[in-house]
Image: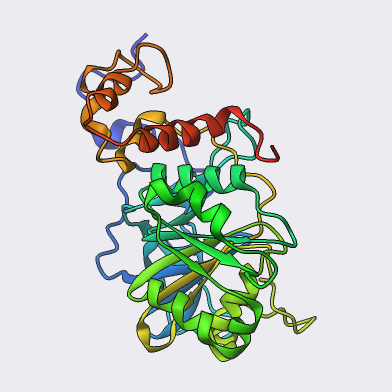
């Protein structure tokens, strides 16, 4: 049944009033061409601390970003109050593409993938040589996450005054991973700090390690307390910084020589999200040998072409063993 006459125009059409009194939804999003560039330093219950120029700005994520979340290290665009003054709040309207991503899951059966850090150049895996004892399987898992996410790994071995590093270094020698060995005395004297800092110069480095290995002690030595205080969030009621080991925090090295991202201590490092085909990219001497592998080859099965490639002398067998050991970490519990 026709409701209106044969010749209708806009004045003839009845428009249903908007009961909420707001504008109708639209797919057109604002461009925010005047947005300022910034970097996410830490995330605390929906509030993001960002560095915009030389100012620390508190911000929240714009609704138009949907479910996309910003993490520490993300390069973002912000609008609103960018003064950095107390009780002001800006808005993150864009998140730039990421050059690298450090991801983990709670365990290997958990499909929920958590992005820990974005845009880091390298991953410093901190482990003690004693007290607590090294956990090679956890180190392997961190290395796999680094290779998968596009980060260069760095081994930082602490407490060498309690145990020698030779055995652990031999385990990772074929991977050609750079490393730094430190002792408690060297940390106190500052000698170890300078050696570690030399590996961080000009880079964004995420630090990871389980509790008790000396990760936070090392980060504190690398970043002066006044720089931590100016960057970290301080609770107005307790007077204490919220960040101890509960959330990731990006800290600038003095002299603008790079960034250190301190992450919470980990008990496990799930690898549910890892695609084995991406890990092989960290082994450029082995990657050409995968050309004749069967489709979806795990590189650790009878038909894998890498066996013949290595047998023909194209690569060191120890490198293939190292690759397969890392790939097999997904099948083993990190406490093994």
Place of residue 215 in the rendered image (x, y in percent of width and height, measured from the top left): 62, 68
Looking at the rendering, in which quadrant would you find the C terminus? top right
Q: Residue at x 65, y 48 (%)?
A: 135
Residue 25 seen in the figure: no
Say how the picture is coloured: rainbow
Place of residue 308 in the rendered image (x, y in percent of width and height, measured from the top left): 27, 19
**In which quarter of the view is residue 286 placed?**
top left
Nearer the observer, 274 or 96:
274
**In which quarter of the view is residue 293 placed?**
top left
Residue that extends furthest to the top in the rendered view of this protein:
1
Nearer the observer, 104 or 307:
307
Residue that extends furthest to the right in the rendered view of this protein:
238
Apparent side of residue 239 relative to residue 159 in the rendered image (left or right):
right
Instruction: Please tell me whether residue 10 is drawn above or below residue 152 in the rendered image.
Output: above
Place of residue 258 in the rendered image (x, y in percent of width and height, measured from the top left): 38, 76
**In which quarter of the view is residue 178 placed?**
bottom left
Q: Residue at x 43, y 37 (%)?
A: 322
Residue 199 seen in the figure: yes
Q: How many marks?
A: 0
Nearer the observer, 149 or 70:
149
Place of residue 218 in the rendered image (x, y in percent of width and height, measured from the top left): 59, 75
Instruction: Please tell me whether residue 196 is drawn above or below residue 1 in the rendered image.
Output: below
Q: Residue at x 25, y 40 (%)?
A: 284
Looking at the rendering, in which quadrant would you find the N terminus? top left
Apparent side of residue 174 relative to residue 162 in the rendered image (left or right):
left
């Amino acid at each position: 049944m026709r409701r209106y006459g044969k010749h209708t125009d806009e004045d003839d059409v009845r428009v249903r009033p908007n009961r909420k009194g707001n504008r109708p939804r639209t797919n057109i999003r604002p461009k925010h061409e005047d947005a300022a560039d910034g970097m996410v330093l830490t995330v605390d219950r929906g509030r993001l601390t960002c560095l915009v120029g030389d100012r620390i700005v508190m911000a929240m994520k714009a609704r138009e970003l949907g479910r996309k979340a910003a993490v520490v290290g993300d390069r973002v665009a912000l609008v609103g109050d960018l003064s950095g003054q107390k009780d002001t709040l800006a808005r993150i309207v864009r998140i730039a593409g990421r050059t690298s991503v450090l991801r983990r899951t709670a365990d290997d059966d958990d499909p929920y993938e958590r992005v820990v850090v974005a845009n880091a150049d390298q991953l410093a895996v901190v482990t003690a040589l004693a007290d607590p004892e090294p956990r090679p399987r956890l180190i392997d898992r961190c290395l796999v996450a680094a290779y998968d996410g596009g980060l260069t790994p760095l081994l930082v071995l602490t407490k060498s005054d309690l145990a020698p590093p030779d055995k652990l270094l031999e385990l990772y020698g074929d991977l050609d991973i750079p490393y730094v060995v430190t002792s408690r005395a060297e940390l106190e004297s500052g000698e170890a700090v300078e050696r570690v800092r030399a590996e961080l110069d000009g880079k964004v480095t995420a630090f990871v390690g389980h509790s008790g290995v000396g990760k936070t002690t090392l980060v504190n030595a690398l970043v002066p307390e006044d720089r931590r205080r100016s960057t970290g969030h301080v609770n107005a009621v307790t007077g204490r910084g919220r960040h101890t080991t509960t959330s990731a925090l990006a800290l600038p090295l003095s002299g603008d020589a790079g960034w250190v991202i301190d992450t919470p201590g980990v008990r496990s490092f799930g690898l549910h999200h890892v695609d084995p085909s991406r890990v092989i990219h960290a082994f450029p001497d082995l990657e050409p040998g995968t050309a004749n592998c069967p489709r979806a080859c795990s590189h650790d099965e009878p038909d894998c072409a890498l066996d013949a490639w290595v047998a023909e002398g194209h690569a060191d067998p120890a490198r293939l063993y190292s690759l397969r050991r890392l790939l097999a970490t997904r099948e083993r519990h990190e406490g093994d």
